[in-house]
Image: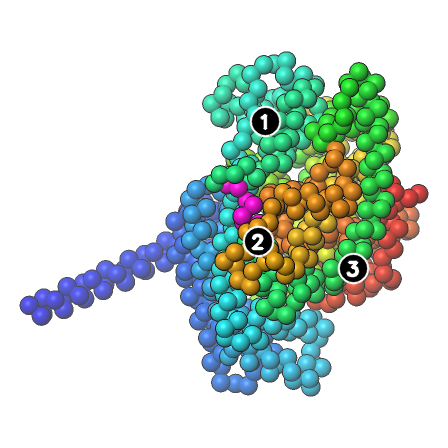
Amino acid sequence: MRKLFLILSLLIMVYSCNTTSNKIEENPFFSEFNTPDGVPPFDKISAGHYLPAFEEGMKRHSAEIDSIINNTEAPSFENTIVALDHAGRMLGRVSATFSVMTGTMSDSIYENIDKEIAPKLTAHYDNINLNQKLFDRIKVVHDDTTSVAKLTTEQKMLLDKIYKGFVRSGILLDAEKQARLREINKELSDATLSFGQNVMKETDSYQLVIDKKEDLAGLPEDIIAAASKLAEKKGLEGKWVFGLSKPSWEPFLQYADNRSLREKLYKAMYMRANNGGEFDNKENIKKIVSLRQEKANLLGYKSHADYVLEETMAKTPENVTNFLEGIWKYALPQAKQEEAELQAIAKKEGQDIKIEPWDWWYYAEKVRKEKYALNEDEIKPYFKADNVREGVFAVANKLYGISFKQRTDIPVYQEDVKAYEVSDADGSKIGLIYFDDFARQGKRPGAWMSSFRKQEVYNGTPVQPLIYNVGNYNPPTEGKPALLTLDQVETMFHEFGHGLHGLLSKSNYHTISGTSVSRDFVELPSQVMEHWAFEPEVLKMYAKHYDTGVVIPDELIQKIQNASKFNQGFMTTELVAAAILDMKWYTKTASPNFSSKNTEGLKGLDVNKFESDAMNEIGLISSIIPRYKSTYFQHIFSGGYSSGYYSYLWSEVLDSDAFQAFVEKGNIFDQETAKSFRENVLSKGGSDEPMVLYKKFRGAEPNPVYLLKNRGFVK
């Protein structure tokens, strides 16, 4: 009997080993990707691969950390800091690939995987960041002033970032506080994940169904066609559907004559995750703000904003507040003047109404036509999405000598995604960039850039970056290609600027490569690219009528130029209002509403009242709301911009001044200036302090007057 038991046991062990082996062989993540350029094999990856890959990735990462700790050699920059920078490669592959799926292809399967793995990942990184033996080695390297003096600036930045990262993660806290910090991090992981998923569900679930053709009055044909196509997808043939993705709701607000329907759609947009029920985010907000405040206090900071801003160019909440107030004093009066213009044109048309938020886009479009004779429906045919993409390629080529070639042998995660190989002027390969341009169900709102693999040098071998850009533009319709608005054209240039930052990186280390810079510096490469989008010389390069191929005429270019400062009061006011709202949430310090632990959190706080009080305090006019209201403000509650939404404006000071460097040379493609920007900004990543890098490019700190000129606030 015992012999039979042993035989059965051996058979079970063999079967288990074979099963495990098969799983490893079948799961693409368990080895380096055997694909062209090492790209993710999306044609072989399925949802079922992610959980076991995450588990194995964490296991391998932990083993790599143990190897660093157990190294019998004295701690050194190479065997501790570089080894730590190299650790976690498999986990990084899994996380980067999973991120694009949850961001652009989310469904209940991916949501459930996210919910299961998020707390495990949080615990995993806490185990590393709170590992005293690991930190002891890091500290030895950090405190060895003789050895540190011999390091390059880039190496010193890496060492400093890793050392500070451990300190800011709580390694110096006592055991009791570390235990509480772990609890906070887990609860934050749950709450931020829930916040983002709620916004996506509310965005995807709402639909304004129109069944009367007269209710479409004023809308351009391509917008009507897109609404018809969306209705067909939802089984509502013969009707028209508008949703809460920006390419759907914004043109409806801009053109639809039916005011009551504009109001209905607009309120649905700004009430996302604020309607009670399962997907309401108000409790998540209170929990996130409370937990972040408590975490900041544990780590010795007055507020979450103080904690975050310590590692930025701005440094303090006071500096951010003063900066925003300085812009607000220009923006709000301009917005009031614009509101008066809208009110006048409504009255002129016989409408006895007060301008409300759902009226702004509609009457602003009328003012634009009246003042500048600019009809966006007239110019959209010149901005075919494919042509705009070729336009950003052409600008990059003229500035930096790089070229782009579409690759059809690269597996993609969705049929509309396109991949391009990027080569330098000497023909050497730089990396790859993917474009995922069109809105669809399960895609997070907005536009962003990220990477499947960052540029670095790994064990002496250069690693080429794999970058992707995501947009949310209306897809092609029957017989007509995807046509972009001026705002969407600018967005494509913007995200491509981030892409260049990742592609042209020349860092030796993963941790500080590419876009791994302070939050208020990272928008410089993206926003500076926007300046080229509508330059006459550039428009002639890419703005061609989708049907005739005719280059955009000079009179239309002049209209675009004339209207370039149009509606800037509104756009700046809604942006600054959102940035101030962000700071209001995260400069809120301990009060009777806060508890020492999160059991009560901000239970007594009314989220909507807090927001309205904050906006009333700064005098925001009723016809404008913040660019993002709190319950769907993903940047600050589920993204990486908490206490950082001001960064877009802070970086605009830099980008406006940076473009001026080209203007001063009398050539927007001046090669000397472009070379300096590439070498001192785009290629450097986080290898030096941001202002040091900027001054190496420009020769001086940026002059804020160019931001004010760029927005039309001063001459």
Of residues 511 and 195, the one nearer the viewer is 195
- Tag 1: residue type? Phe
Q: Quadrant of the C terminus?
A: top right
**Tag 3's secondary structure?**
helix
Q: Quadrant of the N terminus?
A: bottom left
| Disc 2 + disc 3, Cβ < 8 Å | no
Toward the right, the furthest residue is: 715
Q: Residue at x 78, y 19 (%)?
A: 352
The image quarter in which residue 508 lies: bottom right
Residue 391: give x, y in percent of width and height.
73, 39
From mark 2 to mark 1, how far is it between C-alphas? Answer: 36 Å
The residue labelled by disc 3 is 319
Report the colour scheme: rainbow
Question: Along the polypeptide, which appears first: circle 2 or circle 3?
Answer: 3
**Tag 2's secondary structure?**
loop
Range shown magenta: 279-286
Q: Depth-wise, is mark 2 or mark 3 nearer the camera?
A: 2
Image vertical order of residue 683 relative to residue 277, above or below: below
Q: Residue at x 67, y 65 (%)?
A: 302
**Residue 496 visible in the shown view:** no
Q: Residues within 10 Å of mark 1 (few under 14, many from 20)?
A: many
Q: Residue at x 43, y 42 (%)?
A: 108
Residue 395: give x, y in percent of width and height.
76, 44
From mark 2 to mark 3, how far is it between C-alphas? Answer: 27 Å
- Tag 3: residue type? Asn
Q: Residue at x 67, y 45 (%)?
A: 611
Q: Depth-wise, is mark 2 or mark 1 nearer the camera?
A: 2
Question: Along the polypeptide, which appears first: circle 2 or circle 1?
Answer: 1
The residue labelled by disc 1 is 242
- Tag 2: residue type? Leu
Residue 144: give x, y in percent of width and height.
65, 84
The image quarter in which residue 615 lies: top right
